[in-house]
Image (cartoon, rainbow, N blue to C red):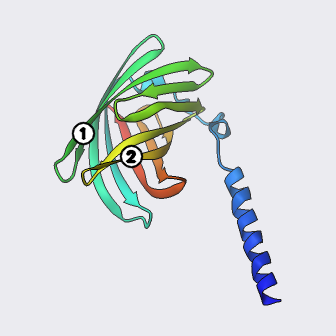
């Protein structure tokens, strides 16, 4: 009898977790939020970002700054990102971003697997992609689920969930400042 009660409890918990997953936010949930994020405007010119990577337990594993420069020609933008980590290592990523209309975007970069997809509404942008991540001499493909929120005309906050096979590896938190 006790095994049946435990099984029922496990099924109930699993169902609750599944339903909670179904209720995840979408960019449309932020459609009425202001200021409205106009990606071509915000990612145009120089920006500076400060960030951290935390592991699953919440421990800070890396700190970094990013110097960014964005430029647009019509519906196509180039975003240059120059990372400098607290250990002195450096990294560069150059995105090509396309505005597809209706708040949708796509993007490519040298270390991105395939094409990134983005959806914006109100003050929010959700940006999803797989990244080739070098770790200790090996390269792993990890999934990023970025959420960016425009706070005002100068500041945007970004929280990204990093996972592999659906298992969370950690989070990246960034604060962008338009210069």
Residue, disc 1: 91
- How many dots with numbers? 2
Q: Residue at x 71, y 58 (%)?
A: 18
Which of the marked residues, 2 or 1, is nearer the chain's N terminus? 1
Q: Residue at x 53, y 31 (%)?
A: 117
- Tell me residue 100's x, y (percent): 56, 19
**Label 2 SS:** strand
Q: Residue at x 39, y 46 (%)?
A: 174
Q: Is residue 97 left or right of residue 1?
A: left
Relative to 78, say whether 47 is above or below: below
- Tell me residue 120's x, y (percent): 57, 31
Relative to 167, say whether 91 is above or below: above
Instruction: Check the image and name the residue furthest to the left.
Output: 88
Q: Is residue 150 visible?
A: no
Q: Residue at x 38, y 44 (%)?
A: 175
Residue, disc 2: 174
Q: Quadrant of the N terminus?
A: bottom right
On the image, which quarter does residue 48 sit in?
A: top left
**Label 1 SS:** strand
Relative to 58, say whether 67 is above or below: above
Q: Quadrant of the C terminus?
A: top left
Disc assigned to residue 41: none
Depth check: 110 or 172 in front? 110
């Amino acid at each position: 009898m006790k095994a049946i009660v435990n099984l029922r409890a496990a099924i109930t918990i699993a169902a609750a977790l599944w339903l909670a997953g179904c209720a995840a936010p979408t960019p449309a949930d932020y459609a009425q939020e202001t200021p409205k994020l106009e990606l071509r405007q915000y990612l145009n010119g120089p920006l500076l970002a400060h960030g951290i990577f935390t592991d699953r337990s919440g421990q800070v594993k890396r700190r970094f700054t990013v110097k960014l420069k964005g430029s647009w020609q019509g519906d196509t933008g180039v975003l240059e990102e120059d990372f400098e980590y607290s250990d002195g290592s450096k990294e560069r990523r150059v995105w090509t971003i396309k505005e597809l209309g209706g708040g949708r975007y796509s993007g490519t970069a040298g270390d991105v697997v395939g094409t990134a997809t983005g959806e914006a509404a109100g003050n929010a942008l959700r940006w999803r992609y797989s990244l080739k991540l070098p770790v200790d001499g090996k390269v792993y493909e990890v999934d990023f689920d970025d959420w960016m929120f425009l706070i005002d005309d100068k500041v945007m906050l970004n929280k990204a969930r990093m996972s592999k096979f659906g298992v969370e590896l950690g989070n990246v938190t960034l604060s962008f400042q338009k210069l």
